[in-house]
């Protein structure tokens, strides 16, 4: 897979940071940036953040910066096979979930975790955050999933030549078989289905974000994931007119407000809304 090189860092935007390096349980090395809170005083929480497929941490740097500016400390990192991290094929979030778990362990060992701890990802990063959040639900306090792709069909049938054939019986599985042969993985169509994953997320509150014009993680599919999520506290934010890569860039003020409202409610224990009068 083609790697996207790093061309910037948080310092260019006036934010403090330091390099971060850690290793997953399966031996893959990961690289990232540790960004402390840009505010003096109490740290508001810890956000572990990552990006979409074939990108690197720069893609989510603007998100990290608005969080750091508001008093959160952020670890943003390159998923395996991306940026400066170690080699590994894309696995639809299965292996990438280990990256979030390793990031958590790294911060835990270096005694940097401050609650609430939030897994936050965009696209492939969102899939990995959900999968890791399901596995680590007793350790973290929330998940933010921006534009997660729900299943194999969303990978193959959109933006690729395979789209016109995706309804043919067996076509998706043939694509997956070819991919497994190329990468050495042994993925099944069921492995890439997020529905049973979110149905097991029953502890950590989840914020889903979707663009109303997203052609990959379509809003109706993200709503289905939202409806299937077992957690008592879950929320779905729609970003008007936004395509897949535009949820933050198109209306950053709307995006930030939705994230902060969710995080503020999380820290307040999700209070019941006050009735008029």
Image (cartoon, grey):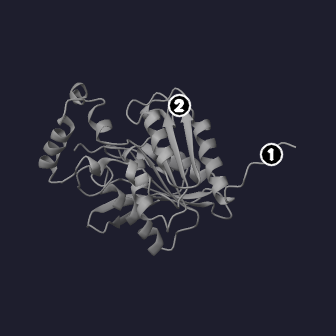
- x, y percentage for residue 156? 26, 35
Vertical side of 134 occupied by 257: above or below: above
Of marks 2 and 1, the one in the foreground: 1
Crowd band around label 1 with a 10 angstrom C-alpha radius: few (<14), some (14–19), many (20+): few
- x, y percentage for residue 272? 72, 52
Q: Nearer the viewer, residue 107 or 158?
A: 158
Task: For mark 1, give the secondary structure.
Answer: loop
Q: Residue furthest front?
A: 169
Residue at (64, 42) in percent of width and height: 257
Q: Quadrant of the N terminus?
A: top left
> How many numbered markers are drawn?
2
Crowd band around label 2 with a 10 angstrom C-alpha radius: few (<14), some (14–19), many (20+): some
Q: Are marks 2 and 1 in contact (CB under 8 Å)?
A: no
- x, y percentage for residue 93? 33, 52
Query: Is residue 199 visible in this depiction of the protein?
Result: yes
Q: Is residue 246 left or right of residue 170?
A: right
Residue that carries the numbered disc 2 in the rendered image: 250
Residue that carries the numbered disc 1 in the rendered image: 275
């Amino acid at each position: 897979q083609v790697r996207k090189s790093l061309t910037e860092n948080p310092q260019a935007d006036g934010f403090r940071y330091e390099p971060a390096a850690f290793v997953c349980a399966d031996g893959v090395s990961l690289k990232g940036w540790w960004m402390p809170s840009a505010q003096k005083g109490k740290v508001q929480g810890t956000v572990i953040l990552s990006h979409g497929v074939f990108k690197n941490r720069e893609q989510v740097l603007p998100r990290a910066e608005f969080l750091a500016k508001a008093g959160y400390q952020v670890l943003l990192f390159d998923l395996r096979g991306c940026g400066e991290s170690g080699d590994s094929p894309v696995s639809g979030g299965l292996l990438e979930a280990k990256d979030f778990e390793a990031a958590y362990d790294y911060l835990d060992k270096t005694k940097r975790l401050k609650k609430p701890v939030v897994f936050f990802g965009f696209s492939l990063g969102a899939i990995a955050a959900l999968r890791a959040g399901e596995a680590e639900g007793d350790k973290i306090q929330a998940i933010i999933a921006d534009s997660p792709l729900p299943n194999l069909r969303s990978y193959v049938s959109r933006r690729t030549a395979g789209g016109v054939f995706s309804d043919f019986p067996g076509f998706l599985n043939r694509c997956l078989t070819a991919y497994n042969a190329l990468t050495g993985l042994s993925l099944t169509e069921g492995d890439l289905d997020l529905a049973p994953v979110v149905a097991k997320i029953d502890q950590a509150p989840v914020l889903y974000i979707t663009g109303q014009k997203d052609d990959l993680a379509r809003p109706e599919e993200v709503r289905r994931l939202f409806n299937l999520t077992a957690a008592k506290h879950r929320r779905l934010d729609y970003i008007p007119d936004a395509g897949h890569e535009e949820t933050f860039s198109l209306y950053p003020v709307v995006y930030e407000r939705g994230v902060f409202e969710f995080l503020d409610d999380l820290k307040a224990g999700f209070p019941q809304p006050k009735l008029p009068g």
